[in-house]
Amino acid sequence: MGYARLFFDRIPDPNSVLWNAIFKGYAENEFYREVLVLFNQMKRKDVKPSAFTFPFVLKSCGKISALREGKEVHCFIIKSGFQGNPFVGTTLIDMYSGGGAIESAHQVFGEMPVKNVIVWTAVIAGYILVNDVEHARKLFDLTVERDVVLWNTMVSGYIESGDMVKARQLFDEMPNRDVMSWNTILVGYMNNEDLKAAEELFEVMPERNIFSWNGLIGGYARHSRFFEVLVGFKRMLTESDTVPNDATLVTVLSACSRLGALDLGKWLHVYAESNGFKGNVYVGNGLIDMYSKCGSIENAIDVFNSMELKDLITWNSMICGLAMHGRGIDALNAFDCMKSMGEKPDGITFVGVLSACTHMGLVENGFSYFQSMTNEYSIVPQIEHYGCMVDLLSRAGLLKQAVDFVRKMPIKADSVTWSALLGACRVHKNIELAELALEHLMELEPNNPANCVMLSNIYGDVGRWKDAARLKVVARGMGVRKIPGCSSIEVNDAVTEFYSLDERHPCRVEIYEALGGLTELMKSYGDEPDLKDLR
DNA sequence: ATAGGGTTAG
């Protein structure tokens, strides 16, 4: 765009076609503000816009939610007699409904002399966007011409409102379906918690494209079914001609992160580099996160350094990854570096920054970063940030201050916050505050036995066995079993889950013998393993 | 040279 603009600026009296070309360039590259600035210049130079001008300008207004400017453009359109143009009208409808002004969108629609199927689709999509499916359906029933896009729009309207029955009914009524119709209903089932229906549909689809595969794999990922993500990806590679794209890789990388599948993650890294994804910001971000969460922070840093283009998520992934690995200084340095590169931090950046402070015990620094959120960056701290502060104080052993902080918080503390405090009470052996934390946790999560088990363990630590037993009984009385903490390890190209004291593995005897040997070895180095939790 | 539908990351 830089060169295009230089060239444009040297044209003595650009006509409307040339103006439209520069608008198109800026709109396609998401420089929406620049489109509006240039449109004003065009008006000042008295160049008459054509019907082609307004779609670019209106789209830009919509994208940056500049409804006020959009209305001015609308007036200009009426004055210059373009309001009947279907292209202009459609973009007006789109802009108004995108800004929540559905009445204005409907008015534009009503005043249009020629309503083709695209105009109808735009206004129906508008009603869907403002959660008025019923109104959308009424309009749909009034249409005389229906093409596959209109049908798909109405089907996805029902899906977004959570009504899969109506969506499926309409899908079955469709005179003809394209791949997108199938993909829409597939993702619909996935997002409305019916994985089985989605899986069955996937098997009978007449045709699949990249969106079908990503819909399946991405749906699994959203439901934390990470093994299925890997299985789906392997199926895609072996039994289809569809080539993975960046969205596919990002999804599979996130599954690797959660499963600790470092070898597969490394394979994906090589695959990405040799298949044209070098320099893809999405994939790079996924790789940073995968390497961090799989324990390989050095590889994460290498990916980070190799990325020429970085966005907010790149920085956030790196900062959070470093904090996660206890490299607080590096995390805070990265934060400074980010600012000097002109990238604006957001709420998630501060989750990383605050947890970096927590792991280094930097209470005062943590507070000044917390203050800077509102003072310097006008970011309103959310519950997770208050939780970070409670965690910061708690882990530093300042339990009393942590409770005071909770009392002064403008938001009600959630279970994560109280659990952080409860966990720290165990380390710092503070029974009184542990009991207080449990009281609140019982209110917030009355059916989670983990909280009672934790307090029971704290009693056990200090030898109050009666109280410990009493709370174990309470925990058991909750009717649900505590979900055991589960971990996973990648061995020989497969990921295996395991629990504490797991007896399921065929090699359990050898595994526990090796663990016993390691424990002895640690003792010989003077380390005394704390085996309390293995009771 | 312009308008309506689907997937991804912290």
Image (spheres, rainbow, N blue to C red):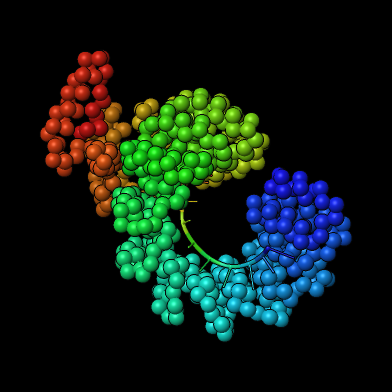
Total marks placed: 0
Please state the horizontal and vertical placement of residue A474, each as a whole percent of the image. Answer: 27, 46
| Quadrant assignment, res A39 | bottom right
| Quadrant assignment, res A484 | top left
Q: Is residue A457 above or below residue A168?
A: above
Which residue is depicted at the point 55% across and 26% down? A333
Which one is in front, A177 or A100? A177
Which residue is depicted at the point 70% across and 64% down? A55
Please state the horizontal and vertical placement of residue A399, each as a whole percent of the image. Answer: 45, 30
Q: Mark yes or no: residue A444 visible.
A: no
Q: Is residue A336 above or below residue A195?
A: above
Q: Is residue A341 above or below residue A62?
A: above
Please state the horizontal and vertical placement of residue A215, each as a whole percent of the image. Answer: 41, 59
Which one is in front, A307 or A331? A307
Which residue is depicted at the point 40% across and 39% down? A269
Quadrant containing the C terminus of chain A is top left
Which residue is depicted at the point 42% across and 28% down? A298
Give left or right: position of A77 versus A331: right
Please state the horizontal and vertical placement of residue A293, each as a whole percent of the image. Answer: 39, 37
Q: Is residue A136 above or below residue A42?
A: below
| Quadrant assignment, res A460 | top left
Which one is in front, A99 or A421? A99
Give left or right: position of A169 versus A227: right
Q: Mark yes or no: residue A26 visible.
A: yes
